[in-house]
Amino acid sequence: MSAAGAIRTLPLATPFSIGDVNAYLLEGEPLTLVDCGPNSATALLALERQLAELGRELGALEQVLVTHQHVDHCGLAAAVVERSGARLAAIAPVAPYLAHWNAAAEQEAQHAEALLRRHGVDEGPAAAVLGASRGERAWGAPVTVDERLADGAVVRAGGRELTALHRPGHSPSDTIFHDAAAGIAFVGDILVANVATPIAAALPLEPDGRDELPRSLRDHREALATIAALPAGTTVLPGHGRAPADPPALIEARLAEQDERTARFLERLGEEPLSAFELARAERGRLAWTDTKSAVADALGHLELLVDAGLAAERRDDRRSSFVRI
């Protein structure tokens, strides 16, 4: 068994407001890249340049791990795999999504539009969000997952034994790769130091046909709890920005912020039904259409906690949902 090698952070530009995404090169056998940036010439050239600076070339890569399905983390996977012959490993439920990228992205975009309209967004803005979602599709490409990982499976990467922990919330496929021996965890976007992680009321990877309130924020809180429960001193390597200095303290602060926001949503509820969009607009003020999807997903996350706690109820008809305090 080869010894664990160094971990190199390779920042790659994205077209999104979050800025650069962190790809991580794990030196050792097999030579592994954790995440790989969006499907762009800019990201590919930056990846090749940074590998060259380390005395490596793209063709030497033997394995790519994907932390989740968002294009800034997996969009370049097809190009990397094609040029290197590397194996792609990811949590098993995301494999069909990545293999049928265009169809899956279209289905997810239509789901987002339907969700927005159900929760109070007019047809025009909802259609605009649909168009924007379709535009993001080009930053990804279909790719085959060679190794489908079960939750709790161990994958060898860079001389390390990484345990794959499927912890959805920010996306349906969020995966933590934990090196218990070295006290290191690759966490994707579950915990980022400089910005609170947005949750997405996304289409489940394995939909059961039921049209129910999403459980994204509840699931994300459980994902944060998984990170907080890692052994003391574990280094958390995020998908963006620097590693948090004190992950448990940051998680405690994030959960407290979420609790405060949930309390504010409860204060806004009364006997008159309000949609998630109305509540989001009351919480954030005037909303640009570009912020509508994230704002409604955020509102639904806090409403789901209130419904679970028995403090609010969802009122549904064939077209729209609204919420009341109980």
Image (tube, rainbow, N blue to C red):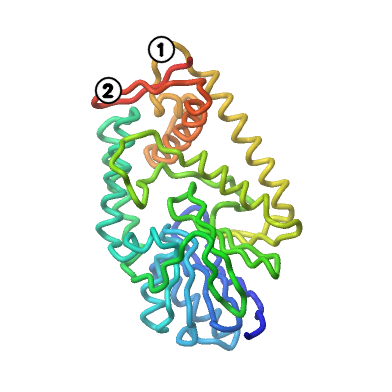
Residue under label 2: 317
Question: Which residue is pictured at 63% across the width and 85% down the height?
Answer: 2
Of the residues shown, which amino acid type is indicated by label 2?
Asp
User: Residue 55 location in percent, x, y?
Assistant: 58, 88
Of the residues shown, which amino acid type is indicated by label 1?
Glu
Question: Residue 272 has which mark?
Answer: 1
Judge whether 123 appears above or below 100 on screen. above
Judge whether 285 appears above or below 191 on screen. above
Q: Residue furthest right?
A: 233
| Residue neighbourhood size for the residue with mark 1, other residues' Cα within 10 Å, grouped as few (<14), some (14–19), many (≥20) | few
Query: Count the marks: how many?
Result: 2
Question: Which residue is pictured at 47% across the width and 74% down the height?
Answer: 64
Left or right: 16 in relation to 126 = right
Question: Which residue is pictured at 51% across the width and 45% down the height?
Answer: 198
User: Residue 48 location in percent, x, y?
Assistant: 49, 80
The foreground one among 220 and 22 is 220
Left or right: 2 in relation to 215 = right
Question: Which residue is pictured at 62% across the width and 75% down the height?
Answer: 160
Judge whether 217 appears above or below 319 on screen. below
The foreground one among 275 and 204 is 204
Q: Earlier in the sequence, mark 2 or mark 1?
A: 1
Residue 245 found in image quarter? bottom right
The foreground one among 285 and 74 is 74
| Residue neighbourhood size for the residue with mark 2, other residues' Cα within 10 Å, grouped as few (<14), some (14–19), many (≥20) | few
